[in-house]
Amino acid sequence: MGNVESNGSYQKHLSRFLPDELADIEGVFSALRGADEDVAAKMGKKAQAGVTLEALKAYVKDALPPSMVTRLYNGMRSIQETHNSQEAIPWVSKEQFVVFASTLFKGNAQEKSGVVLKMVSGAQKTVKGSQVLEFAGDLISSVIHVLSYRKLLKGWKLKKLNNSVARIKALATQLVSELKSEGTLEGASALDTTCDQNSMEDWLFRVPQISTFLKVVLQQGLLLLRPLSDEANETLCLLPECRGLQGTALVSLLDLASITYLNSHLPSELRDKWQLLFASRIHGESFTQLCGHIVSKGPCLLVLKDTDGYIFGGFSSCSWEVKPQFQGNDTCFLFSISPSLAVFTCSGYNNHYMYLNHGQQTMPNGLGMGGQHEYFGLWVDSNFGQGHSKAKPRCTTYNSPQLSAKENFLLDSMEVWAVGEPPEGRGPKSILDADPEAQALLEMMGKSRQSDGFRKPPEDDDDEEDNN
């Protein structure tokens, strides 16, 4: 322990923080020292000169799982003090605490790599991919735990979401799949990979979610730089605000791990809010109802579950329109949630991003994303109960594999979530707006909306609400 060199002097790390930030860090360290004195007093011992593991656990209480508190402590103790060349002291000094905070909040991947390596394994210089997987799962679980503990789930309720245990492992597996080592044999599993500090640096550089998760754990678990850091906005955008799920009996197909993962792949301007537009278990298994709830509602996430339990879907980058042509742009993507978690972005092969049609005799009727007519990467037929995911070997538009358990699948349930702010100027000014099913039916029949030209101008209150 105590053998991770800090890059530059202690003063360099101090200079990274504003005066208010330094005061906050010193305040947390003082609180930790106070916890250490309380622990020592209960045990009838003299308090140490620094912070012990027991004191850190007493300070954090139930905000973080004990395993993550131990990992944080190992990371702090891995910092080599500038004035101490001897064996590391058996506690965390103020310098180690400050440098640890500087490294994880302000440092680059190279700086973080040594600390994270010690958080994965407290004593070893190399670790196995399986140990990194365990660390990643522990980190994701800790983020979900602390956000729930601090009541920062932003409208998401654990009892109204899918079981997160399997999804946490799926997200950890996906993140660790990016782990590489120069000595890895071709075809070897990521879990068998032997990783050193260089491998960890490469991983942290290519998987920025790890750094974001660590910041959340520090900010919310240790209450460190929570109101002051520039990174606070980044970590608070980890989860979008949930709208539309409250007040329903629906248990969503989603879970917190997959929500954070999918949200990180959305354009940054769409990550703040998710609004439930359609759920087949609420609105019925009706293609007309589906169209009525998603047409002209802005970018959306479609989430499907087939009768074999596979969960998958796609991101539509713009409002759905009923027409016999492809629509959308190259920010669309397909994704899998279960049994594995992955996102598949555009290949550039063609522009067959989105397709929605109904009532045509010569063109396919249904909702599709990627591929081509009759051979979509994701397709929901207009009879709603059936669909397909055809990809032999891959969907041409998104380079995605078959997403469903069977190529031709039966649909168990479906949800559609609008992401970002709703399109401007769409208040309930028209009877067609109040009845989205009627609106969709007109568009399916090719009828124009004559009332559009007679809409009242937006009211000031609506504008203010959109800007809030």
Image (cartoon, rainbow, N blue to C red):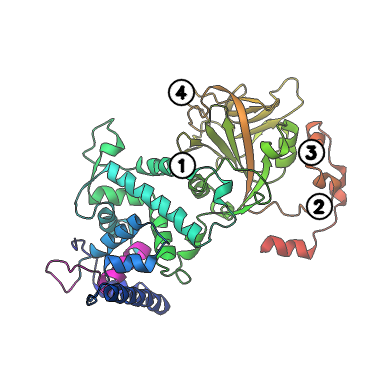
Quadrant for the N terminus in the image:
bottom left
Of circles 3 and 1, the one toward us is 1
Bounds of the magenta span? Answer: 82-106
Q: Name the residue under label 1.
A: 167
Q: Does residue 139 lie above or below 326 as drawn?
A: below
Q: Mark 2 points at which residue?
A: 428
Is label 2 in a helix, a strand or a loop?
A: loop
Amino acid type of the residue that numbered disc 1 sits on in the rendered structure: Arg
> Where residue 331 sits: x, y (%)?
55, 43
Reading the chain from its start, which is encountered first: label 1 or label 4? 1
Q: Name the residue under label 3.
A: 437
For the residues labelled 4 and 3, the Cα–Cα distance comes to: 37 Å
Is label 3 in a helix, a strand or a loop?
A: helix
Amino acid type of the residue that numbered disc 2 sits on in the rendered structure: Pro
In the image, residue 284 lies in the stretch drawn in magenta: no
Amino acid type of the residue that numbered disc 4 sits on in the rendered structure: Pro
Reading the chain from its start, which is encountered first: label 4 or label 3? 4
Q: Residue at x 30, y 46 (%)?
A: 132
For the residues labelled 4 and 2, the Cα–Cα distance comes to: 46 Å
Circle 4/circle 3 CB separation < 8 Å: no
Of circles 1 and 2, the one toward us is 1
Q: Residue at x 65, y 32 (%)?
A: 355
- Write down the quadrant of residue 68 in the picture: bottom left
> Where residue 106 sits: x, y (%)?
36, 65
